[in-house]
Amino acid sequence: MEWFNDFWSTYSTLVFTVGVHALLALSIWLTLSCGLLSLANAAFMGIGAYVAALLTVNLEWSFPAVLLAGAVTPALVALLIGAPVLRLSGVYLAMATLAFGEVVRITILNLEITGGPEGLNGIPLVTEGWHIVLILAVTIYSLARLRRSKVGRAFEAIKEDEIAARLMGINVDRYKLLAFTLGAFIAGLAGALNAHFTFFISPREYGFENAVDILTMAVLGGTTTLIGPMLGGSILTLLPELLRSLHDFRSLVNGAVLILVVLFLPKGIWEPRRIRAFFSRNKGDQA
Amino acid sequence: MLEQQLLNALTLGSVYALFALGFTLVFGVLAVINLAHGAVFMVGSYAALAMVSHLNAPLWVAMLGAMLGSGIVGLLVDVLILKPLRARNAPHLAPMIATIGVGIMLTSSAQGLFGAEVLRFPEDILPAGEFLVGGVHVRALEIAIVAIAFLLMAVLFITLKRTQLGRALRAIAESPKAAYLLGINVEGLFHVTSFVTAALGGIAGVLIGLNFNAITPQMGQPMLHKGIAVIILGGMGDIRGALIGGLFLGFAEVISKAYLSSQMGDAVAFGLLFLILLVRPSGLFGRKLERKA
């Protein structure tokens, strides 16, 4: 077991990060599954992280309560801004959510209670491996159930054709708001978990780049299944670690992977239909 | 003191406008949000710096070289990435993500080649000279920046309004398919647009690099945010809106930094932006264009 202890003491944060990124990728998968291109998830993550960290540090709430508050607060914010924002679509929605994200980041940067640009230091390290595994499992199970439910089918109908969905009697606005709010809930949860194993959070972690990173994970992995976003999140977390030897050039590979996936794997890496087709073709060759 | 601030605002605003013009033109003609535009801006300033310090080129040659260099980058992005995506009729998310990848690659290449530290133009190549006009210190450099920015914008405006090329571009902006049926070489003009807009982004990079005399691999990112703010303010794809929006942002930024806190100024700008998007998604000066995207 000694090798495991060595491994764990070096890489536990990395493994935790993979889990949190998987959650984040699922949060944007949810909004994308309803056809919404929202770039606000990094901001929701930030709100969750700060609310949770402040409750732990200042009020010493218990961890489950902190996690719940960290998830519910951004969900409430999403509910509030959702009604006006979700009237926009496509690129305009992306830009509005991006502007919202910047407002959140700059507000955090300028508040007293958040520690401003210095960030919050000394957050107790209470997140444990099984917390992340459990929450991830519950999230996957719920999302898998959601997909097959009336709600999930409504999301899919809206994504495919909003007008047709409306004509079939689906309350498009309400379902969009639901997807947006649930996405914020998951992102906030990820933020709350993240804050309690990194010891330190700062506004820099919740800006435009991070919003783009989250979107990238989902797109890289593919959004046709639940496995895709999690796979994408894991790859984008681990790839920079594997490429340490390239030093300054290592994010070059990240960029190249992104371009190649968009060009050659438009549905992402994990696309069951293509993978099945690939294997059955190989079998055909042998016969 | 106010006059001094207004001069700073004009200098910054004219470069913002120049940057945003390229950004908005790509959106208008190619219907792509080019998130690599900030990185192209950074490439321009490094290209000029490299020519000045390694080849001892005079500044105006370096500026032309920077436009050519960043223009070629833009052209390559169009030919290698955007064209295959167009051919496949990919959803609008695809080119946006691909340009994010391009931006990451360019930024990380610059960091690998030139290092992460702040680089500066040698002092002796900057136009020296400073005049006192009505109690305001005017640097020759600032005059040059404003003059170059407005000259390039004037050329662009006249080209778009008065020439055959401009008419063709405006036709494509209305409908690429109709333009194609009218015998316009749509693909060729997409390449031209990509080259020209990237060249404008690159020269904006040189001008900002000269103004603050500080060049870093990350300098494109805040500029990209400002570009997004400007084209939302002015209406996406709206050329005149980009000019007014750019100048407006320059003034808003300088004035709020001078008279409010230096950080909250940005929040005011983005908060305003957020509100404009909610009330008038087509921008302050845009026509009513429902859900073009």
Image (cartoon, coloured by chain):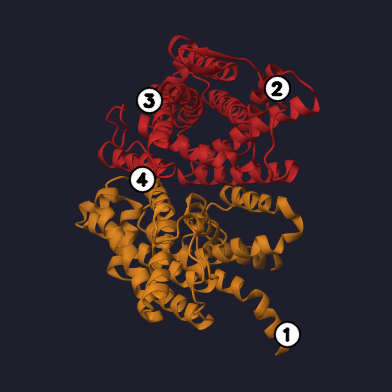
Q: Colour of chain B?
A: red
Q: Which chain does the numbered disc 2 sit on?
A: B
Q: Dot 4 surroundings within 10 Å: few (below 14), some, or many (20 or more)?
A: many
Amino acid type at image mark 4:
Ala
Q: Dot 1 surroundings within 10 Å: few (below 14), some, or many (20 or more)?
A: few
Of the image marks 1 and 4, the number of the one nearer the N terminus: 1
Q: Residue shown at 47%/68% (left/top)?
A: A23
Q: Secondary structure at mark 3?
A: helix
- Do the numbered discs 1 and 4 sit on residues whose CB atoms are within 8 Å? no
Q: Position of residue A90 (x, y in %)?
A: 37, 45
Q: Which chain is orange?
A: A
Q: Which mark is residue B241?
A: 3
Q: Nearer the viewer, mark 4 or mark 2?
A: 2
The residues bearing labels 3 and 4 have C-alpha atoms spaced at a distance of: 18 Å
- In the rendered image, which residue does mark 2 sit on? B62
Residue B205 position by quadrant:
top right
B102 or A141, which is in the foreground?
B102
Q: Secondary structure at mark 1?
A: helix
The residues bearing labels 2 and 1 have C-alpha atoms spaced at a distance of: 56 Å
Q: Secondary structure at mark 4?
A: helix
Q: Which mark is residue A3?
A: 1
- Do the numbered discs 4 and 2 sit on residues whose CB atoms are within 8 Å? no
- Do the numbered discs 2 and 1 sit on residues whose CB atoms are within 8 Å? no
Q: Dot 2 surroundings within 10 Å: few (below 14), some, or many (20 or more)?
A: many
Amino acid type at image mark 1:
Trp
- In the rendered image, which residue does mark 4 sit on? A96
Q: Which chain does the numbered disc 1 sit on?
A: A
Amino acid type at image mark 3:
Gly
Res A39 visible: no
Q: Residue shown at 57%/27% (left/top)?
A: B204
Seen as rendered, the residue at the extreme right is B55
